[in-house]
Amino acid sequence: MISVQTWADAQRLWDFQQMHHEPRPCSVAVGLGSHDLGVADVTVDLYRRGMFPLIVFTGATSRTTRDRMPRGEAEHYRERALELGVPASAILVEPNARNTGENVNFARELLTERGVEVSSVLLVSKPYEERRAYATARRLWPEIEIVSASAPMTLSEYVESIKDPRLVLDMLVGAQQRLLVYPERGFMISQDIPVSVTAAYDRLRAEGFTSRLVPNP
């Protein structure tokens, strides 16, 4: 049973991860691979709204997705977008990235190879990884404008959609840890983190929501 305090701490991390960007027209969308097909759905919705002419779906498989997305995250995203009516000519697939940094770098390399001029990217991620994705893209692709987007869902709605509360809380803690340790490793830009957010992270970590942490030497 997850306590009221634990849910409050999770909500604090969830709220902090939201960048609250207003979607606006960009050169291209980059949909970051994950276990969540909702990323593809959001990307398709933004495409229909005329926010970009081209989509890059990027992602291989991970321990979370190898069973449910055996052909690779980006390929399953592509199939979803095609089912929803996006023409194949508007989708590029990058099938090799295994982390957010590779998502950004490999998508950029693919677009360069295809001769696509990029001045802005609408970066589509899971709701609890907006800030992590944004910070990574700003570090690795600093010359372009980054606009963040994700499904407009509450934490409770997202947990209900995933059907695995512990996985969501583990992922929230993992995303927050990366904001703390990755800037010094050169993987993302540094951002100001409120003391209340760090305290919530520390409590969740102490409660054992640690399966998505990276080693911190």
Image (cartoon, rainbow, N blue to C red):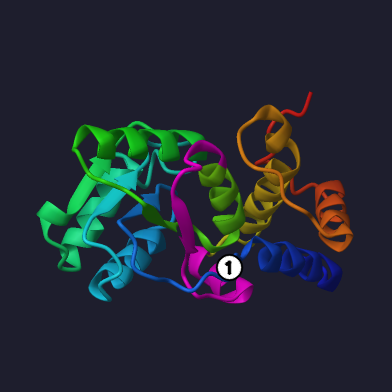
Where does the image place residue 76, in percent across and percent down from the top left? 28, 49
Where does the image place residue 173, in percent across and percent down from the top left? 71, 50
* Location of residue 65 (image quadrant): top left
* Side of 36 where 71 appears, left or right: left
Q: Residue at x 55, y 52 (%)?
A: 134
Q: Amino acid at mark 1?
A: Val
Residue position marked by numbered label 1 in the rendering: 159
Residues drawn in magenta: 139-162
Q: Residue at x 56, y 58 (%)?
A: 130
Asked whether residue 144 is drawn in magenta, I would say yes
* Location of residue 213 (image quadrant): top right
* Side of 79 where 106 appears, left or right: right
Where does the image place residue 66, in percent across and percent down from the top left? 39, 38
* Location of residue 82 (image quadrant): bottom left
Asked whether residue 135 is drawn in magenta, I would say no
Q: Residue at x 68, y 33 (%)?
A: 214
Where does the image place residue 26, in percent across and percent down from the top left? 34, 61
Callout 1: helix, strand or loop?
helix
Name the quadrant of the C terminus.
top right
Name the quadrant of the N terminus.
bottom right
Q: Residue at x 22, y 44 (%)?
A: 116
* Side of 9 where 171 appears, left or right: left
* Residue 163 sits above or below residue 171 on the image: below
- Residue 1 can be seen, yes or no: no
